[in-house]
Image (cartoon, rainbow, N blue to C red):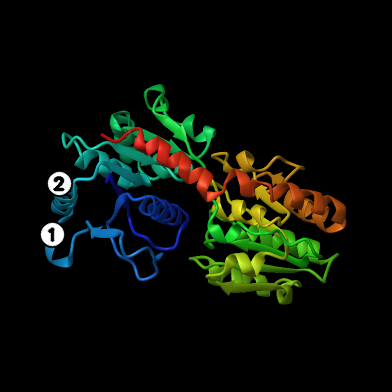
Amino acid sequence: MKHIAMYIGSLNKGGAERVMVNLAEYFYSRGYKVTFVTTFKEDDEYTYSEGIDRVISGLTPEEEGGRLINIYRRYAKLRKVWKQIQPDLVLSFLGKNNVMSLLTTRRLHIPVVVSVRADPKMEYHNYSRFLEFMAFRLFPKAAGVVLQTSDAAKYFPENIRKKVRIMPNSLSKEFIRPVYRGAREKEVVAVGRIDDNKNQRMLIDAFAKVWNEHQDWKLTLYGDGPMMEELQEYAKTLDSAEAIAFPGRTNNVADKIAKSGIFVLCSDTEGMPNTLLEAMALGIPSISTDCPCGGPKDIIEDGVNGLLVPVRDTEALSKALLKYIDDEAFAARVSSEASKIQEKYAPEVVNGMWEEYLCGLMN
């Protein structure tokens, strides 16, 4: 039985964590031994099968000391974890984790696959120049480097690009379903963390312009985050305030948005956005910013199965909303084309790609 260790900060409810949990469940169902290695254990986390093991590699309060001592102790504790569980392969997700996984497995003869889940410039260069330096030094030693878009590969030098495999996200099973074909609700929806990068304020402003002409439409923003309260207060100042709702997180997104009229993603940067994939799979006419590192444009063929607008361009977003609202036949055609991604990004298709790739790298 092959043993895969999956290393990430925590399993709290985010896009990268969801992808890792889905992969863990797939490999476990296929007879692999799977161990999550996480730095922390948070209160709000994804659930997973009892047969999947979990190891916490972070320091306890009793183990902590000064800053430099903590760095060394984290390194030593994680290296001890690899020696104890002896995986056939480590799959690591996200910035610092990727660097740590490569540092702590040196000379242990464990192949490591690192995966960058967003725009690598944001994950490394903008976060820390030292972290970027370490990534450029260590990634060539990885067994593989998984990215989500071809644009993301352009960030790395040639010696790393040679190891890159582009791997999309798969759809969660609840989004593989017959598409609703009736009259859609007059509702614009967004799903995700409410923060500056997701830029929901742009959507609120664009919707406010559209609402002046179409006051039978409403806007619903699912999720929470550091800017939620600020945006709630801002929305109250607009004429469209009564048409804008912030219901918070929901555990049954597919059921809540399946009949919605329009889905919007306004992010400044994205990898392969799960929420956009999911909305399109449900046949919801969708709009996304054409943001780096190219995930939305890899999914959307502009004007065919969705619409792309420039980053931070509120006017363009307003026009895109009106294009769907004012032309129901166009919206219906886009809906039909969008739902075809159920086949391309089906879990069995994408997970099979991961299995073939990782098995080829195991000792």
Q: Is residue 242 above or below residue 69?
A: below
- Choose top left, top right, bottom left or bottom right for residue 116: top left
Q: Quick check: 6 left or right of 237?
A: left
Foreground: 25 or 157? 25
Q: Earlier in the sequence, mark 1 or mark 2?
A: 1
Q: Quick check: 59 left or right of 249?
A: left
Check the image and name the residue furthest to the top: 158
**Label annotation for residue 83:** 2
Residue 313, how many percent across, how many down? 69, 48
Q: Quick check: 11 left or right of 347?
A: left
Q: Quick check: 262 left or right of 151?
A: right
Foreground: 16 or 64? 16
Q: Is residue 311 above or below residue 216?
A: above
**Label annotation for residue 65:** 1
Three-letter residue code for mark 2: Lys
The reply to whether residue 183 is visible in this rendering is yes
Query: How many other residues sit within 10 Å of disc 2, few (<14), some (14-19) or many (≥20)?
Result: some
| Residue at screen point 72% across, 65% down | 259
- Choose top left, top right, bottom left or bottom right for residue 46: bottom left
| Residue at screen point 60% across, 51% down | 277
Cβ atoms under marks 1 and 2 closer than 8 Å: no
The reply to whether residue 126 is visible in this rendering is no
Residue 101, how many percent across, how many down? 26, 43
Foreground: 174 or 79? 174
Residue 281, how many percent across, how many down? 65, 53
- Choose top left, top right, bottom left or bottom right for residue 38: bottom left
